[in-house]
Amino acid sequence: MDENFPQKVLRQLFGFDSFRPNQEVIIKSILSGCDVFAVMPTGGGKSLCYQLPAVIFDGVCVVVSPLLSLMKDQVDSARELGIRAATLNSTTGKRDFVQTVQAMENGNLDLLYVSPERFNTPGFIERLKKNKIAFFAIDEAHCISEWGHQFRPDYLALRQIVDIFPNVPIAAFTATATAEVSADIQKQLRLREPFCVRASFDRPNLSYRVVYKDDLSLQLVSFLTSVPGQSGIIYRGTRKKVEDTAKMLTKHGFDVRPYHAGMSDTERAWVQDAFSKDQIQIIVATIAFGMGIDKSNVRFVIHADLPKNIEGYYQETGRAGRDGSPSQCLLLFGYQDVILQKSFIDKYEDPQVRDTTWRQLQEMIKFAEADQCRRKALLRYFGEEYSSANCGNCDFCNDEIHRVDATVDAQKALSAMQRTGNRYGIGHLVDVLVGAKTAKIKQLKHNTLPTYGVGSDKPKPYWRFLINALVYKGAAIMKPDCDYPVPQVTQYGWDIMRGNEPVEIIQFPTLKKQPRTKVENEDVLTDSIRNDHDLFEMLRQRRKELAQERHVPPYVIFTDKTLLEMANQKPMTPEDMLKIAGVGERKMEVYGMTFLELIVDYVLVTVEEPEFDPEWLE
């Protein structure tokens, strides 16, 4: 095979002039018959690493993927490229099942997507034995590791591949895996001297930001108002919180739908499909949502509750900006979430599970409290050092957060606890500190205490944040056997009050100040929207119409990034259109002319003397 053949397929089929980092070496390793283990970030182009060799190889590539919706989107995307792809799962009808099997037996199938449950069916494995299997691609491979954040027992059946198909290579891919999880994946799959790639976990187009969670409803409305028309995901910790948040945002006029495991399969499938097709703007969901989303134009991900671990946080934020365009990741952080999660962790009976879960949560807290570049802290967790001194795309590097001395205020808060007898909740303590004139304070005569009103120079949210921080730091502890959280001073708290221990806290930014970004190629993208917003919106509308006709998500036709490049470059001929990243020969044949005609019409109307003669229109 010509050494440059993969490059030719990349241009002709996928419409790109060059591979992304690590793609070419992975593809060539697969084509040489080696096992491969690749850790690549979401949006790093994993699917192309097995789709391209599947087209070149004689035989079918069997892709094991965990979610039905993800398989459907990937099959739709592959077919739009002209790749012969199909899926076999629990939703496959009898006719489609027979047609897919016949296509595989006749050598007319490049990609076959299956779930681990389907693969583990004895009849299915016997059927595979009768066909020529080019290689196996294991997507979301972290699901096979008990140390991973989304362990799926059915993935363990994949261990038998090396016994049943000893001469067939295996390529395993995951977006999130520590060194410990990576080693376990290779062990569980029994990979044979695999070629290993650990790509950078850095997503330079994502901005990371942490804001103190106070009035959540007001904060969410404020943020969403600042990003009109953008697509995003809001994660909440429980089903009830999902429902309540979705209802609240709907009342404020936002196009929102809830998603959680308590909904029926039909409801969840409809919501996910509508979101993929840009028929819904915003999803409020538990972490059950997103693993099967291949949507490229998610512009923001908000965590309204503290994630349980860094792996989950990284995976979920990675659903933003898959097309490489600037996108925001916002974490609303409050120590009250830490205290609540700690109370749940303490109830675990298995001490190893309890310790591991608490350690993972502490790593998440360290990230939220980071006194360094958030990108640096995130990458360091995955064993990668970020070389730049300033990423220019997180709140710390943009000088939005500061660590401040709060010793005196901590002494005031702890004194309020002590002087009220360690018997009252945080809300009442805050009222005492700010000098509120409530009936309860008057009745208890707490307005006569020396600490009454000593904190009137700061707002209530500050004192709530500080008291919760003191509980997390161990200066106070929540009283057991109380109907509501009641903090009481510990020995460490007494040391602070006596002036023997200093206290520092993070001064988080508000949502009013929008983050500035320094992203490679951002100027091009921003200029495209600013200078040709009308053309870009016309291209999006045409894409939406075509997507509805073909019953596929819009990004399957062309991504936002490809449309932005069209709006910026304004190709005037079919040859020019083929130079646009993401426009291959297949998509040019199916969609190219309709977008090209729209662009030419736009230029003819908006430019007084266009410097071209569109002979191809005649």
Image (cartoon, rainbow, N blue to C red):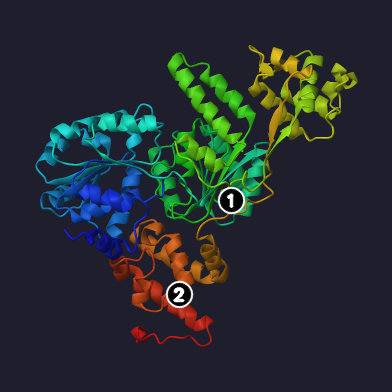
In percent of width and height, residue 211 lies at: 64, 40
Instruction: From the image, state whether disc 1 or disc 2 is nearer to you.
Output: 1
Is 480 placed left or right of 595 in the picture? right
Query: How many numbered callouts?
Result: 2
- Determine the residue positioned at 44% across, 65% down: 563
Helix or strand or loop: what does disc 1 sit on? loop
The quadrant of the rendering that contains the C terminus is: bottom left
Residue 91: percent from left, percent from top: 28, 42
| SS at circle 2 | loop
- The answer to whether any part of residue 286 appears in the image is no
According to the picture, the residue beneath numbered tag 2 turns out to be: 570
Q: Quadrant of residue 188?
A: top left
Q: Nearer the viewer, residue 88 or 561?
A: 561
The residue sitting at 82% across, 15% down in the picture is: 419
593 to 511, vertically: above or below: below
Dot 2 surroundings within 10 Å: few (below 14), some, or many (20 or more)? many
Q: Is residue 230 left or right of residue 448?
A: left
**Who comes first in sequence, dot 1 or dot 2?**
1
**Quarter the N terminus occupies:** bottom left
Depth order, front residue of 557/175: 175
Q: Nearer the viewer, residue 359 or 420?
A: 359
CB of mark 1 within 8 Å of CB of mark 2? no
Q: CA distance from mark 1 to mark 2?
A: 31 Å
In this picture, residue 136 sits left or right of residue 73: left
Q: Residue at x 68, y 39 (%)?
A: 508
Judging by the rendered image, the residue that carries numbered circle 1 is 392
Give the label on residue 327, or none: none
Image location (x, y in percent) of residue 280: 49, 52
Q: Quadrant of residue 383?
A: top left
- In which quadrant of the rendered view does residue 117 lie? top left
